[in-house]
Amino acid sequence: MPKLLVLYYGAETPAVALAEVAAEGAKQVRFAEVDLRAGAPHQANSDRRHRQLPSPNDARSYDGIVLACPGIGDISADARTLFDAMERMPGDAFSNTVFGLVGGENTALLGRVARLGGILVGEPRGIADPEARARAHGKRVAQVVEWVRHALSHEGHHDQHSQHHHHDVDHVDHDHRDHH
């Protein structure tokens, strides 16, 4: 089953609401397993509805990651810490991971995601309401995660089939030479 992480920063911002609706959208995709997590420790006055991502290393176990950010502005210190740790991981750690961003025009965050080397899925166009756009984007990212997982499963099967086929061809050639 494709696993998708919806991660937000800022317990007091619209990022929480956008993350929640992005997770709702992702859950509409059949067989999608969706985890909604806070990217930083909860503030004392927050409602603690969502558990925190235990460590940046845990992000590697997901096929897709949707990040909900608080709009235009600087990346929070907690998000910078996450990206610093993710960028220190091996170069191929996120090569087949599907990423999406919801909330604002945070080009600094987009740049950090792009440097991870994964597959970026843009927000759908033509949806003015930020929550409706986040819901549609969550669903879209989950669909792309499903497609990538499906393609990768065939790639592994194709590699095994290809190796088996080459072995058979070698065997046939060998047999052909023995008969001459």
Image: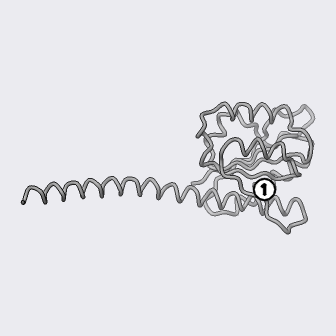
Q: For the point 60% across and 39% down, which residue is it?
A: 93
Residue extending furthest bottom?
A: 126
Colour treatment of the image: one colour
The correct choice, above or below, for 102 with respect to 132 in the image is above
Q: For the point 63% across and 56% down, which residue is it?
A: 145
The correct choice, above or below, for 155 with respect to 82 in the image is below
| Crowd band around label 1 with a 10 angstrom C-alpha radius: few (<14), some (14–19), many (20+) | many
Residue 49 picture quarter? top right
Whether residue 24 sits left or right of residue 97 in the image: it is right
**Could you say where residue 20 lies in the image, as x and y percent from the top left?**
81, 52
Whether residue 166 sits left or right of residue 70 in the image: it is left
Residue extending furthest front?
A: 180
The secondary structure type at the circle numbered 1 is: helix
Residue situated in front as seen by the camera: 155 or 142: 155
Residue 124 picture quarter? bottom right
**Could you say where residue 14 lies in the image, as x and y percent from the top left?**
91, 49
Number of residue marks: 1
**Could you say where residue 39 lies in the image, as x and y percent from the top left?**
78, 38
Residue extending furthest left?
A: 180
Q: For the point 75% across and 34% down, which residue is it?
A: 82
The correct choice, above or below, for 49 with respect to 27 in the image is above
Which image quadrant: the N terminus? bottom right
Name the residue carrying label 1.
22
Residue situated in front as seen by the camera: 69 or 11: 69
Residue 80 picture quarter? top right
**Could you say where residue 144 lies in the image, as x and y percent from the top left?**
65, 59
Q: For the point 79% across and 47% down, which residue is it?
A: 110
Whether residue 135 sits left or right of residue 64 in the image: it is right
Q: Amino acid at mark 1?
A: Ala
Which image quadrant: the C terminus? bottom left
